Image: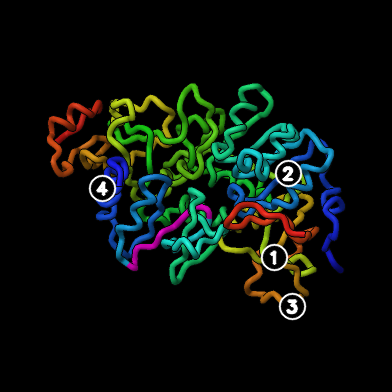
Amino acid sequence: MTKVHQDIEAALSCVKNGHTLMVGGFGLIGAPLTLIDGLAKKDVAGLTVISNNLGEKGKGLGVLLSQKKIKKAIGSYFTSNREIGEFYQRGEIELELLPQGTLAESIRAGGAGIGGYYTKTGVGTDLAKGKEEREINGATYIFEPAIRANVALIRAWKADTLGNLVYYKTARNFNPGMATAADVVIAEVDEIVQPGELPPEEIVTPHLFVDGIIKAKKILTKEGVKVYE
Amino acid sequence: MSDKEFMQNMIARRAAKELTGPCIVNLGIGIPTLVAKYIDDENVFFHTENGLLGVADVEEDEIDPNLVNAGKLPVGESIGASFFNSAESFAMIRGGHIDVAILGVLQVGQTGEIANWAVPGKNIMGVGGAMDLLVGAKKVIVTMTHTSKEGKSKVLNECTYPITSTRSVDLIITELAVFEVIEKQLKLIELMPGVTIEEVRAKTEADFIY
């Protein structure tokens, strides 16, 4: 059995109009740039995107924003893409801002079969408005629902053909969490190896979470994003 | 070094004095990032919320685009460093495993509450890990310039921008003074070299004890 896709269109055939997508990365670091580029070329609209940022202006998820394919974004730090402000002012995008830890934990909960959880983060701030409060052991917590997506597009370092994944340095970030919290998970990787080549103790995402693998062609380098064929 | 850089480094150097190992420290974006270069204690471990414990300096020729801090700036990894995912990183933060967080802020109120994520009238679009750090770090130190570019005090009676947490910070370090927050009250504990109490009074809207 192999989960490896040769062609990006086939890998992205699971993404439909109006879908909710999780997209890994902390800015462009650890973002699946090849898959995002594939979405830029795909005729798809009305997406809800769950990602820490929306890339940068004209880069990463910023391309999909410019193309008006994103209806709603859920994330913690949209400031890194200045274009979002203009879209927001014109009413062309809906934004849901979550503290970064809440975003990460809501994804974790979504992948772990948890309906939601209580957290102290954000209590008493504008981001807690309208959220259920509860006293637990003398402290105030707010309820945060778990989040899931139709499709998660993630970035890893190496995959074996079964779908086991390992990650590279701080390009890990939201990727392992998102791998657990979507109906279909597609991983973009630098290197594809045979089963048995990744030491079992070092596998971060076991293969049962992963549905498809594709080799990365757009890669973040010191000089910026480069395309490799 | 420009005047601004000199001032920022002075604040960072003072903040560094608060860190003695063993301790786990999270540095925010801006002045806090400068603190690391004034630490020479192998038992002070730097945590960055995007997933690294053991942040170190990096030389220009060793920059790796996939090894960055929370400000997306290139960093190195120290001996004994580890990488982890975002949920685990925030379990460390929210779960009380970070000893000290050093943060930049827009405003501080006289009860020690801070505002550092939104400005009214502007689009509210970035909070990052600030709210989690306020809730979870054992000690929170704020490093900031005392006044805005327009010369207005940033140490206020009450924050006019949306607050980051109802929790008060523990220590406030500016280019003029150091304040400790004791029972929701500011106490001036130190003047920076060459600064007078009159100058601090003139540039501080908040009430403080001395």
For the residue labelled by badge 3, is the local secondary structure a helix, a strand or a loop? loop
On whether disc 2 and disc 3 are found on a single subunit, the reply is yes
Q: x, y percentage for residue B209?
A: 16, 34
The answer to whether tags 4 and 2 share a subunit is: no
Q: What's under tag 3, amino acid-wise?
A: Gly
Q: Quadrant of residue B56?
A: bottom left
The amino acid on which the numbered mark 2 sits, given as a three-letter code, is Leu
Q: Mark 2 or mark 1: which comes first in sequence?
A: 2
Whole-percent x and y of residue B19? Answer: 29, 57
The answer to whether B100 appears left or right of A149 in the picture is left
Q: Name the residue located 48 percent from the left edge and 41 percent from the top edge.
A: A121
Direction from residue A173 to residue B17 in the image, left or right = left
Instruction: Identify residue for label 1.
Output: A165
Q: Which residue is mark 4?
A: B10
Tag count? 4
User: Label 3 belongs to which residue?
Assistant: A196
Q: Quadrant of the N terminus of chain A?
A: bottom right
Q: Secondary structure at mark 2?
A: strand
Q: CA distance from mark 4 to mark 2?
A: 45 Å
Residue A97 vs A14, above or below: the answer is above
Q: Secondary structure at mark 1?
A: strand
Residue at figure coordinates x 82%, y 63% from the top left: A4
Q: Are marks 2 and 3 in contact (CB under 8 Å)?
A: no
Q: Secondary structure at mark 4?
A: helix
